[in-house]
Amino acid sequence: MIDLTLLRDEPELVRRSQIARGNAPETVDAAIEADRSRRTALSTFEELRAEQNAFGKQVAKAPKDEKAALVAQAKDLADRVKQAQQTANEAADAAASALALIENVVIEGVPAGGEEDFVELRRVGEVPAFGFEPRDHLELGEMLGAIDMERGAKVSGARFYFLKGIGARLEIALMNLALDKALANGFTPMIVPTLVRPEIMQGTGFLGEHADEVYHLDKEDLYLVGTSEVPLAGYHKDEIVDLSDGALRYAGWSTCYRSEAGSYGKDTRGIIRVHQFNKLEMFVYTTPQDAEAEHLRLVALQEEMLTSLRLAYRVIDVAAGDLGSSAARKYDIEAWVPTQQAFRELTSTSNCTSYQARRLDVRHRPEEGGKTEHVATLNGTLATTRWIVALLETHQQEDGSVRVPEVLQPYLGGLEVLTPLTGSASAQGAK
């Protein structure tokens, strides 16, 4: 939810943000008018209700011979109060609908435009060069006995898969590496629910224009989450949290689900764009004043992970029109995928300022005994299944084997090289 004080006092700032996102600036005027109507209707209702309460006391004290006439007046007043309440409720609903069209105000410096209008901030690492024709991650995964798309489709349909043998071990190794990184940096590990109530999904901003990408269980009226960000944002719903000792940092490990609506024909080969995957997500509650510094801290942790895995990558400042409704700024980190000759997103991290916290009513008290204010929330990926794509392709060798980055070797029992299966299907694909 947009800060109503900001909307009322600095409408031009909000209007510029909407334009940068590619949204109609008229939505700001409509929201201001709807908010004004809501406040007027609420004020009328409260005045009539106060009048009703005072009149009720007058009726109670009136002599018997006057009560009949006063009771008739009280009934008329009650009807007017009821009508005013209905008008106030309708105005509140209309305001909520109008305000829902106002996305989080982007931070100054965020590039305007759409998906292709990002700004590249830096490139890190050397793009691998091969003296042979590199194989893509699916071919390598099949040779290693690590990925089985065919049986995934047989069991669950298109864009599902099995990770098996060394593939399963590799994902668990990645997640444990990320978990250790999170623990070393003050994050509390969490295994979170992957089904959430509508108000939690709505509160995080995932039921807007991309609602068709979310799986919904109609009978239970629950949503499958596409990221641990959702349950972690709801964890402190309707609470006043204590930030006196610093930010609250959580690392949520979960399976994630996305319908990938609108992506027909895109990345259908392999495990780049799938319906189910695992992810370790960082989530932070902090003060609005510290949010931008915390954002850079999350990016640094992501870069440390990718650098340790010896992956070439670039960091981009995502354009306003490609931000989710809750994000005021988002940095993506894209790793080089050799067979695509392109950088592909492996991580993203968003500063949602106080937008989600307002919707979920998460506050803190800056000063003891003082007035509360909404916190800022941030999120960022620290490891996910898609990383296997870049790892296999970057570290492959001509015979189809794959070198294991040194940082991952302890999580794989000391394995240095993953080798293709040569016989038994029960082989582990490594030596």
Image (spheres, helix red, strand yellow):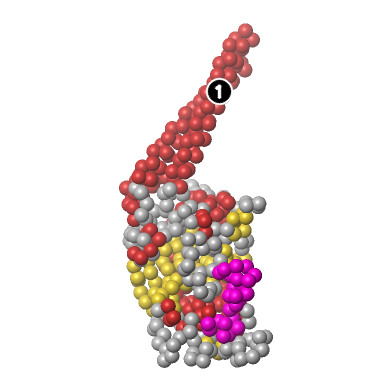
Q: Residue at x 55, y 54 (%)?
A: 201
Which range of residues does the magenta coloring cover? 139-163
Image position, residue 69 (x, y; %): 58, 11
Residue 334 seen from this side: yes
405 is higher (above) or lower (below) than 259: below
**Crowding near the residue tagged with mark 1, few <14, some 14–19, many ≥20 C-alpha atoms within 10 Å:** few
Q: Describe residue 131's horizontal placement relative to residue 417 as left or right.
A: left
Q: Residue at x 50, y 60 (%)?
A: 261
Image position, residue 421 (x, y; %): 60, 88
Residue 309 seen from this side: no
186 is higher (above) or lower (below) than 323: below
Task: Name the quadrant containing residue 109.
Answer: bottom left
Q: Residue at x 33, y 59 (%)?
A: 112
- Image quadrant holding the C terminus, namely bottom right
Q: Residue furthest top?
A: 65
Residue linked to disc 1: 79
Image position, residue 354 (x, y; %): 46, 54
Q: Describe residue 33's horizontal placement relative to residue 231 as left or right.
A: left
